[in-house]
Image: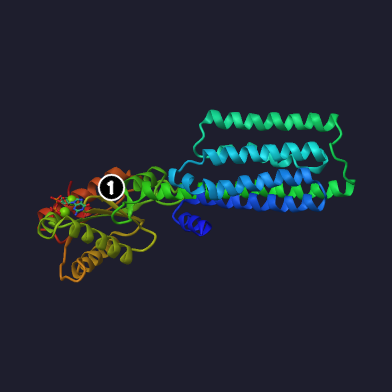
Amino acid sequence: MMLSEILQRLKYENFYWNIGFYGLVLAGVTHAFFLLLFLYLHIPQLALVNVVSVAIYLYSIFGIGLRALDRKDDSTIGWLVYGELLGHGVIATLYLGLESGFQYYIYSLVLIPFFISTYSPKIRLLRAFGVIATALFLEWWGYSHPPLLALPSSVIHNLHYMNLALFLLIIATISYFYTLSGNDYRDMLFERSNRDYLTGLYNRHYLNERIKNGLVRRGAKHQSFAILLIDVDYFKKINDTYGHSSGDKVLKHLAEVLKEHIGRSAIISRWGGEEFLVLFEACSEDMLVEMAEYLRITIKQTPMLEGKERYITVTIGAAISEPKEPFESVFYRADAALYRGKEEGRDRVVCAKELTL
Ligand code: GH3
Ligand code: MG
Ligand code: MG
């Protein structure tokens, strides 16, 4: 019942909490295995320690797990896990010696505090130093004292292999998931900062970055390029007549039409309100105007409000870069061409070449 509730909740939680919970489950299962192992080896003291360990993980999951999820506060669970790993590592090492490899689990605690979101940097460092101090103490103790229990060396060696493998697996898993969550986060930030929320097209920021980093592809600096500046005619009227949300739908639909009819090599962006900028790699003037005319007519013939016969027209300003001409200058010419198109009555393509600026 409780477990299904937690699993249900985790579906809506982010990567961090999912990894955290599955980590707790795994740790609990591992200690249940240790418990059986120590019973099998007839070491009741260590079996008892693992009863406590399993209890700590059960309490972390079922006792305070949901509350931690609700409050987005993992600090109590974090301290419990820290105490458990330190305590178990120290006691098992005192009993079985450094040769058994139980101290390795303590080493993983150098990493873990840095992943727990609610800790302050000071607490993270303190916890990391606590681990270092404990590890050094165990090294000193292990080399200067015999283990409290003497097991056959073959058993100790097998324990060592098992613990080393498990420890390395823990480190690899933590690192793997951490980089994975970092990638997701980076991708999300990239999408948020480079795409327009309404249409999903690239925004002005993205285009500026691409331009700054050398147009249009792979460092080819003074490569020539072409711009289409597409502006919806009388868009204000659409907002005034059908409402702002219908205006939004028209913009979304227009973005879809552009995506559908413009090749992948071009960058389509929403430059501002109802203005779109398409950046092409080098092409001839004829090709550019032909493309612009094709778009103008396609847009004109596509009903823009779902279920309604509502059409829009656009005016397009086109410009091709001269050798070594900066983007701003080409944009200025495309904008002037667009302005001329509006003046001349809209619903047309004007190429900057035809203008005397
Ligand atoms: P013109 O033919 O001269 O281009 O006329 P226009 O009405 O299209 O041009 P104007 O620049 O006067 O108006 C643009 C309008 O676009 C004004 C603004 O309210 C609207 N607009 C800008 N961004 C959005 C948006 O995200 N959603 C909606 N619905 N409207 C927007
Ligand atoms: Mg307009
Ligand atoms: Mg405009």
Judge whether residue 187 can be spotted in this image.
yes
- Identified at 78% across, 46% down, the residue is 44
Looking at the rendering, the quadrant in which ligand 2 lies is bottom left
Tell me: 91 left or right of 335. Answer: right
Q: Quadrant of the rendered structure where residue 237 is?
A: bottom left
> Which sits in the foreground, 338 or 91?
91
Tell me: 277 left or right of 26. Answer: left
Q: Quadrant of the rendered structure where residue 112 is?
A: top right
Q: Position of residue 110 (x, y in %)?
A: 64, 36
Q: Position of residue 320 (x, y in %)?
A: 29, 53
Tell me: 9 left or right of 316. Answer: right
Neighbourhood count class around disc 1 (C-alpha, 10 Å): few under 14, some 14–19, many 20 upward = many
Judge whether residue 20 can be spotted in this image.
no
Figure disc tally: 1
- Image position of 72 with respect to 269: above or below: above
Secondary structure of the residue carrying tag 1 is helix
> Which sits in the foreground, 349 or 180?
180
- Identified at 48% across, 41% down, the residue is 73
- Image position of 122 with respect to 201: above or below: above
- Image position of 224 with respect to 287: above or below: above
- Identified at 77% across, 43% down, the residue is 45
Q: Position of residue 210 (x, y in %)?
A: 39, 47
Colouring mode (rainbow / by chain / secondary structure / one colour): rainbow
For the residue marked with disc 1, what is the amino acid?
Val
> Which sits in the foreground, 198 or 209?
198
Mark 1 sits on what residue? Answer: 330
> Which sits in the foreground, 196 or 114?
114
Q: Position of residue 236 (x, y in %)?
A: 13, 54
